[in-house]
Amino acid sequence: MLSGSESIAQLINNSIIYISFITELEILSFKEISEKEKKQIKKIFNEFVIVDINEEIKSKTIEIRSNSSLKLPDSIIAGTAQFLDLPLLTADKDFQRVKNLDLLLFEND
């Protein structure tokens, strides 16, 4: 689970990382995740800024979901990136359907 990507590690090195609370929930709720991995992930997440939902993110999420047909969790993640005016780093090509989203797509090493 925690194999990682060298190119992503280099890209985000010494950066402030923002993640949606949805990302935190999705990752920590994987059935296959061990308790040891969960502890490691939580330790990593302590270094991140976890962004909770607010009225503006809700509004952006509604707009994104109605215009792109993304799943609700992905719409919240995209809305959070737009709210923060930050690029969204992902391997999920479905995010390409979102207009006005600064998207950084990567492929797994």
Image (tube, grey):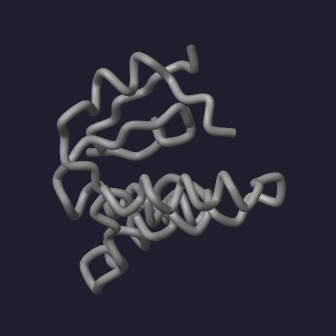
Q: Residue at x 36, y 63 (%)?
A: 46
The image position of residue 67, as x and y in percent, is: 46, 57
Q: Give the image quarter of residue 101.
A: top left
- Asked whether 96 or 109 is in front, the reply is 109
Toward the right, the furthest residue is 32
Horizontal side of 71 relative to 65 (left or right) equals right
Q: Residue at x 32, y 77 (%)?
A: 59
Q: Residue at x 19, y 40 (%)?
A: 15
Q: Relative to residue 72, is residue 9 depicted above or below?
A: above
The image position of residue 65, as x and y in percent, is: 50, 63
Quadrant position of the N terminus in the picture: top right
Q: Give the image quarter of residue 8.
A: top left
Quadrant position of the C terminus in the picture: top right
Q: Relative to residue 100, is residue 31 depicted above or below?
A: below
Toward the bottom, the furthest residue is 55
Horizontal side of 99 relative to 24 (left or right) equals left
The image position of residue 93, as x and y in percent, is: 55, 32
- Asked whether 59 or 33 is in front, the reply is 33
- Asked whether 55 or 109 is in front, the reply is 109
The image position of residue 54, as x and y in percent, is: 30, 83
Mark count? 0
- Asked whether 72 or 64 is in front, the reply is 72
